[in-house]
């Protein structure tokens, strides 16, 4: 009888594990949407297989023979999931000096050699910090990272040591539930936007909270962008906010049809803001007045990019639009050209010498934004 | 097909859940509890029918056991007599099943809504905007805070408290309706099932986000209360031996 009971319990445990890991409807798994970075003729991008690859933009060959693989323990265990799974990479790699810096969803920061892809350091060496979703920023030999446990970390880029070690706690105070946005650094101050609607100002020197903090009515979806003395940030209440640094309330807000998920771009007094309602809005950076709009027809998830006088915008359906900013204002909302990619664009992208390097799902595209075609495309999926 | 599912069932439930969260001081846990109560209340006519069928079946148990004793060796005769008994009492033995089946899509949608609203991964959060209405109350609620009491609603309860509540309440609810059988084999299977389901759900609670487990726990508790009120007592919960007393006690 005892044996039957034990067998019964084992069956219950196995069946339950099987159900837990295979049951549908739990939403999409974390697979990452790392954007592209370009330096010295090489494109760096995180892949869905949990690696960062370095691709020569001319030869299209991988620079590193054995890209460093970021793996983490899977939760599937007994049933559908493998024991080891690829770590998701959302943050766009940052290239500085001879290193490329990568933050992972399992909560580690890595420095890899740009020459070989070999690991130089990781932080922490053991264990994990909160998931890194927003791209880190580098300033003054320091890399600043915001993480899902509501913390901001400052590490020396040379060795990964913690810079704020003079404090009682080496990390800043918990700022919010989750920090999935990137911090922005200006004049020794780090500005952080949070899901609970705060803009915090931290000392880049020691991580201490500065006097100025502002709370908005809605949660902030995008990373903050600074232009002059003003922060521009997108929110979940469908508004784009302009906030003068040090002020007690926003200067203006502009309402779109859906969330402003992507960080806006500000250029020559005009805010170019893509919304999940599929429109690119042109807004006066001083007054918040709408100067124009372009309906892409599909949510704009990635931030727009400027190269010379060209504005490049990619929407989620994979359409890439190029606008000429030298045109009169009323003509700027008419795209010069449209290039269709056959995959979804959710990642930030970079441009160099007439080419936009765009990661769309598991492909990397080089789009000629002057001629309006795809120069080459490359699969980022691991070969079977 | 999927679009129809989203349009008619999933999106309305998801948006009400999000709106409730904003109304209830940003507490997503309270929103889950409130929505579970609302859904239970809305499906009350169906539940009532189901419970009445259960009660009627419970009331027939003494006669059923007599029939089993009398015709236990002749299964065909037993089946015929049982059907006759059901017909005379105006009870459909499957009558308690179909209200449950009708409610099934609602529970699936509720489960999916909770998972989607919690948006535990960046992909899920980004995908959430497709399902949200442009109501101001919804706009102002996003993103939801996953903290509630000691729980992170997006992760399993680390202290096993919810697992015990979910398993315990499910056991009580099943025990209230589990009619004793004269056949020892049937009785043994029934006992196994009464134990297996709470154990499985208790285990699932340790693996699933606690927001979902909260929904199970509240749903079970409401189930126990309504069952108590409709059937007029604890049903078979109080009966220690199936042969001790056949009639449910109040």
Image (cartoon, coloured by chain):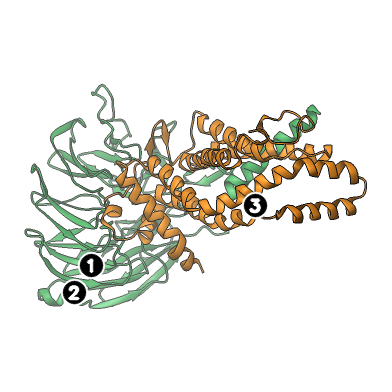
Q: Is residue A118 left or right of residue A176?
A: right
Seen in the picture, residue A169 relative to A80 is either above or below; the reply is above
Element under disc 2: loop
Label 3 sits on residue: B96
Alpha carbon of mark 3 to alpha carbon of mark 1: how far?
A: 55 Å
**Which residue is drawn at the image coordinates 20% and 47% (left, top)?**
A217
**Which residue is drawn at the image coordinates 16% and 74% (left, top)?**
A332
Q: Chain of mark 1?
A: A
Q: Nearer the viewer, residue A129 or B228?
A: B228
Q: Nearer the viewer, residue A26 or B88?
A: B88
Residue A324: x %, y % from top left: 17, 73
Residue A177: x %, y % from top left: 32, 39
Residue A333 — which label? 2
Instruction: Mark 2 vs mark 3: give the one in front.
Output: 3
Q: Nearer the viewer, residue B105 or A39?
A: B105
Task: Say whether marks 2 and 1 touch (CB < 8 Å).
Answer: yes
Q: Is residue B185 left or right of residue A231?
A: right
The answer to which image quadrant residue A322 occupies is bottom left
Task: Say whether marks 3 and 1 touch (CB < 8 Å).
Answer: no
The quadrant of the picture occupied by the C terminus of chain A is bottom right
Instruction: Mark 3 vs mark 1: give the one in front.
Output: 3
Residue A382: x %, y % from top left: 52, 57
**Neighbours of disc 1 within 10 Å: few (<14), some (14-19), many (20+):** many
Judging by colour alone, the chain drawn in green in this rendered image is A
């Amino acid at each position: 009888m005892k044996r039957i009971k034990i067998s019964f319990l084992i069956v219950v445990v196995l069946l339950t594990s099987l159900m837990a890991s295979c049951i549908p409807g739990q939403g999409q798994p974390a697979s990452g949407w790392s954007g592209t970075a370009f330096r010295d003729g090489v494109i760096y991008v995180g892949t869905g297989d949990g690696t960062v690859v370095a691709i020569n933009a001319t030869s299209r060959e991988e620079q590193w023979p054995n890209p460093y693989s970021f793996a983490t323990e899977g939760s599937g265990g007994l049933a559908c999931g493998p024991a080891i799974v690829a770590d998701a990479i959302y943050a766009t790699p940052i290239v500085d000096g001879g290193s490329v810096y990568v933050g992972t969803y399992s909560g580690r920061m890595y420095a890899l050699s740009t020459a070989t892809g070999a690991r130089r350091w990781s932080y922490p060496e053991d264990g994990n910090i909160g998931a890194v979703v927003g791209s880190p920023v580098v300033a003054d030999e320091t890399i600043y990272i915001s993480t899902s446990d509501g913390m901001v970390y400052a590490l020396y880029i040379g060795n990964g040591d913690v810079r704020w070690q003079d404090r009682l706690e080496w990390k800043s105070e918990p700022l919010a539930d989750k920090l999935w946005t990137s911090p922005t650094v200006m004049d020794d101050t780090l500005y952080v936007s949070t899901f609970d609607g705060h803009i915090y100002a931290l000392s880049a020197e020691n991580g201490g909270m500065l006097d100025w903090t502002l709370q908005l009515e809605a949660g902030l979806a995008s990373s903050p962008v600074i232009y002059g003395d003003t922060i521009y940030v997108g929110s979940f209440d469908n508004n784009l906010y302009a906030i003068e640094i040090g002020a007690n309330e926003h200067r203006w807000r502009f309402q779109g049809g859906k969330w402003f998920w992507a960080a806006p771009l500000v250029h020559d007094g005009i805010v170019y803001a893509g919304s999940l309602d599929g429109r690119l809005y042109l807004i006066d950076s001083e007054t918040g007045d709408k100067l124009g709009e372009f309906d892409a027809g599909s949510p704009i998830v990635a931030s727009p990019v400027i190269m010379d006088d060209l504005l490049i915008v990619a929407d989620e359906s994979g359409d890439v639009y190029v606008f000429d900013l030298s045109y009169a204002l009323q003509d700027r909302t008419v795209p010069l050209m449209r290039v269709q990619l056959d995959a979804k664009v959710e990642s930030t992208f970079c441009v160099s010498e007439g080419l936009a390097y765009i990661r769309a799902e598991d492909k990397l595209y080089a789009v000629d934004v002057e001629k309006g075609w795809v120069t080459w495309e490359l699969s980022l999926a691991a070969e079977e | 097909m999927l679009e129809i599912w989203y349009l008619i069932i999933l999106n309305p439930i998801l948006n009400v859940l999000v709106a409730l969260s904003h109304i209830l001081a940003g507490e997503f846990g309270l929103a889950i509890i409130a929505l579970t109560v609302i859904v239970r209340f809305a499906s009350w006519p169906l539940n009532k029918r189901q419970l009445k069928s259960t009660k009627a079946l419970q009331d027939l148990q003494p006669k059923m056991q007599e029939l089993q004793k009398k015709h236990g060796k002749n299964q065909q005769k037993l089946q015929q007599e049982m059907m006759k008994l059901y017909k005379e009492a105006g009870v459909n033995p499957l009558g308690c099943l179909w209200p449950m089946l009708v409610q099934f899509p609602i529970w699936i949608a509720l489960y999916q809504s909770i998972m989607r609203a919690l948006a535990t991964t960046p992909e899920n959060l980004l995908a959430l905007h497709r399902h949200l209405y442009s109501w101001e109350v919804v706009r102002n609620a996003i993103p939801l805070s996953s903290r509630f009491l000691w729980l992170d609603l997006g992760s399993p309860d680390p202290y096993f408290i919810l697992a015990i509540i979910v398993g315990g309440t499910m056991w009580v609810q099943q025990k209230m309706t589990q009619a004793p059988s004269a056949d020892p084999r049937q009785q043994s299977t029934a006992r196994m099932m009464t134990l297996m389901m709470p154990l499985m759900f208790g285990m699932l609670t340790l693996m699933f986000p606690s927001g979902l487990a909260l929904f199970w726990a509240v749903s079970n508790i409401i189930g126990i209360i309504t069952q108590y009120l409709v059937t007029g007592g604890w049903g078979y919960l109080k009966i220690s031996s199936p042969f001790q007393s056949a009639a449910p006690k109040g």
